[in-house]
Amino acid sequence: MKPSIVVVLLALLATLALSACGESKQDKAKGTVCDARADIGKQVDKLKGLTVSTVTAGGVQGSLNAISSDLSKIAGAQGDLSADRRKQVQDATKTFTSQVQDIAGSVGKSTSVSDAKAQLTSALQRLGDAYKQSFAKVDC
């Protein structure tokens, strides 16, 4: 073999070897979904741990913003998932989002402090249940 052909073959082999080490789009998307799913769980647990004496508007808003960001990350990654995983993630997102909207619509309708406390406690428990019914089932 001519030296130039050997160099080209070695370069080609090196390129193939390096590309084999990279993560596929599907693997990256799964990682994004799993990271976002884990953060949603963390935020839900944080919210469930709040009490009337520890709750602040900023704290709740921060967790809700983080959940919204995680849902956006999941939506952005769905196109690179396998068909089965994409359906699983889409179903979880739809279920969770629908339940969060229902919960949000039921909060803040009381007139007394004791009713507000009961509403908050119930809403945060329902949020945890919504997570378990949807994203906790997503295989990571």
Image (cartoon, rainbow, N blue to C red):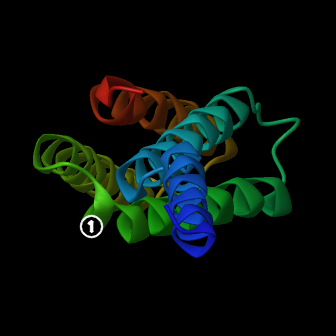
Farthest residue, direction front: 1
**54 relative position to 6: left or right:** right
Q: Nearer the viewer, residue 139 or 17?
A: 17
Q: Nearer the viewer, residue 111 or 31?
A: 31
Q: Nearer the viewer, residue 123 or 134?
A: 134
Q: Looking at the figure, which quarter contains the C terminus?
A: top left
Q: Position of residue 120 (x, y in %)?
A: 58, 40
Asked whether the viewer can see residue 111, the reply is no
Q: Is residue 6 above or below residue 37?
A: below
Residue in view at x 72 percent, y 63 percent: 61
Q: Is residue 9 above or below residue 125?
A: below
| Other residues around mark 1 within 10 Å, as few (<14) / some (14–19) / many (≥20) | few
Residue in view at x 57 percent, y 33 percent: 41
Q: Which residue is mark 1?
A: 79
Quarter of the image where one finds residue 102: bottom left
Quarter of the image where one finds residue 80: bottom left
**119 relative position to 88: left or right:** right
Q: Name the amino acid type tagged 1.
A: Gly
Residue in view at x 13 percent, y 48 percent: 87
Q: Position of residue 21 (x, y in %)?
A: 57, 44
Circle count = 1
Q: Position of residue 12 (x, y in %)?
A: 51, 63
Q: Position of residue 19 (x, y in %)?
A: 52, 55
Q: Is residue 82 above or below residue 122?
A: below
SS category of the residue bearing label 1: helix
Asked whether the viewer can see residue 98, the reply is yes
